[in-house]
Amino acid sequence: MPVWEPDGSNTPLDLKAAGITSIVWCIGFRPNYRWIDVPVFNGANKPVWHRGVTDAPGFYFLGLPWLHTWGSGRFSGVSRDAAWLAGQITGKDVPVA
């Protein structure tokens, strides 16, 4: 049976020293933001963003319902949001795949 919850142990990692500049974290079909310790949530513990961009530098959301359109939280529409968000992050036009 697969492990669905982490065992609680953490391994510290200096992201800068390791050369890691981006993290993509997928949480499944139900939101669970308990592990995020960044001030990007409202009083109802919902993320606050505009098209996935938060007020925290370098912190973004993707794949949430109605991020920009009805298709944002679905496989059929997430590619448009991903391309737009990648463009915001890189400062370049990113074509929709």
Image (tube, rainbow, N blue to C red):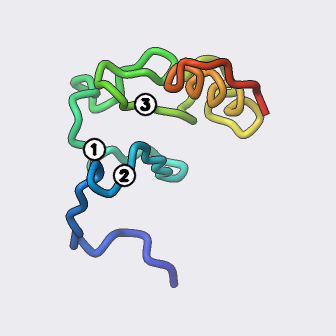
Where does label 2 land, which residue?
19
Q: Looking at the image, tell me whether mark 1 or mark 2 is earlier in sequence order.
A: 2
Task: Name the amino acid type tagged 3.
Answer: Tyr
Q: Looking at the image, tell me whether mark 3 or mark 2 is earlier in sequence order.
A: 2
Q: Residue at x 68, y 36 (%)?
A: 74
The secondary structure type at the circle numbered 2 is loop
Image location of residue 93, percent across then percent down = 67, 18
Image location of residue 29, percent across then percent down = 54, 49
Measure the C-alpha gap from mark 3 to mark 2.
19 Å
Task: Name the amino acid type tagged 1.
Answer: Ile
Q: Which labelled disc corresponds to residue 36? A: 1
Q: Looking at the image, tell me whether mark 1 or mark 3 is earlier in sequence order.
A: 1
Of badges 1 and 3, the one in the foreground is 3
The secondary structure type at the circle numbered 3 is loop
Label pair 1/2, CB-CB below 8 angstroms:
no
Image location of residue 46, percent across then percent down = 34, 29
Q: Residues within 10 Å of mark 2 (few under 14, many from 20)?
A: few
Return the residue nearer the eye: 43 or 91.
91
Q: Which labelled disc corresponds to residue 60? A: 3
Return the residue nearer the eye: 29 or 92.
92
In the rendered image, which quarter is residue 11 located in? bottom left
Of badges 1 and 2, the one in the foreground is 2
Q: Residue at x 59, y 22 (%)?
A: 87
Image location of residue 73, percent across then percent down = 62, 34
Tell me if residue 68 comes above or below residue 38 in the rendering.
above
Measure the C-alpha gap from mark 1 to mark 3.
12 Å
